[in-house]
Amino acid sequence: MKLDHSQPLEYSTEQNRLNILGFWIFLGAEIMLFATLFTTYFVYQSRYGNGPSGGEIFEITPVLFETIVLLTSSFTIGLAIHAMRIDRKKAMLVFLGITLVLGLIFLATEIYEFTHYYHVGLTLQTSGFSAILLTTLGTHGAHVTFGLFWGTMILMQIKKRGLNPQTANKSFIFSLYWHFLDVVWIFIFSFIYLKGMM
């Protein structure tokens, strides 16, 4: 395996560069998935029949909390990658761990939110609005859940094997994924929650 020392560790081999390119292509497909969900939501947002509307069920406090937590986790994963690039393994593990804890807090808040929706009568069968709302939020939540498992595996690998071209590549690709989830959440926060509260 030939290392290119002029590149950051995550880009230092040809295979690593191909992995990153492949992941960008994968993110393109993920963008299409969420674009489809958002488009469907915009079609069904006012079709709530006898069920509650967004204005009746959305609460600013948990949503704002989720947003702050997830945006903070985007900052900490950035710090983890910076620590990785300057070969600070311990700092990298700390920031990656903080990112995962914040992701867990986000997920717990989302579960609380889903429980609240259920208690006010919002289920997948209530209306077109409720079905697409829960599907969109659930899809994002499932991605965060997957990210938590993925990030934990990377943390364990770095602890065991240290920082090398493979673990650096995996960490960088994970950071791209995590930033992507944050961008999707900004759209959810802006176009579903804030718009729904108006």
Image (cartoon, grey):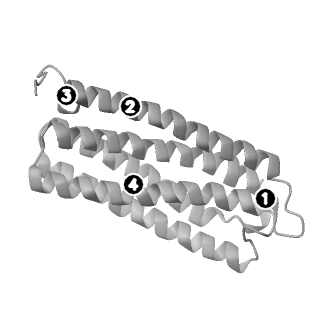
Residue at numbered disc 4: 147
Mark 3 Cα shell of 10 Å, populated few (<14), some (14-19), many (≥20): some
| Whether residue 99 is visible | no
Mark 4 Cα shell of 10 Å, populated few (<14), some (14-19), many (≥20): some
Looking at the rendered structure, the secondary structure element under dot 4 is helix
Vertical placement of 6 versus 88: above or below?
above
Mark 1 Cα shell of 10 Å, populated few (<14), some (14-19), many (≥20): many
Mark 4 or 2, nearer chain start:
2
Left or right relative to 34: residue 174: left
Q: CA distance from mark 4 to mark 2?
A: 18 Å
* Residue lying at the far right of the rendered structure: 50
Corner quadrant of residue 111:
bottom right
Residue 22 image label: 2
Looking at the picture, which amino acid does disc 4 mark? Gly
Vertical placement of 188 versus 145: above or below?
above
Residue at numbered disc 1: 129
| Whether residue 41 is visible | yes
Mark 3 or 1, nearer chain start:
3
Q: Residue 51 location in percent, x, y?
A: 84, 69
Residue 8 image label: 3
Looking at the rendered structure, the secondary structure element under dot 1 is helix
Mark 3 or 4, nearer chain start:
3
Mark 1 or 4, nearer chain start:
1
Q: Are marks 3 and 1 in contact (CB under 8 Å)?
A: no
Task: Name the residue rendered at 74%, 71% in the picture.
Answer: 122
Q: Nearer the viewer, mark 3 or mark 2?
A: 2
Looking at the picture, which amino acid does disc 1 mark? Phe
Q: Nearer the viewer, residue 60 or 176?
A: 176
- For the N terminus, the quadrant is top left
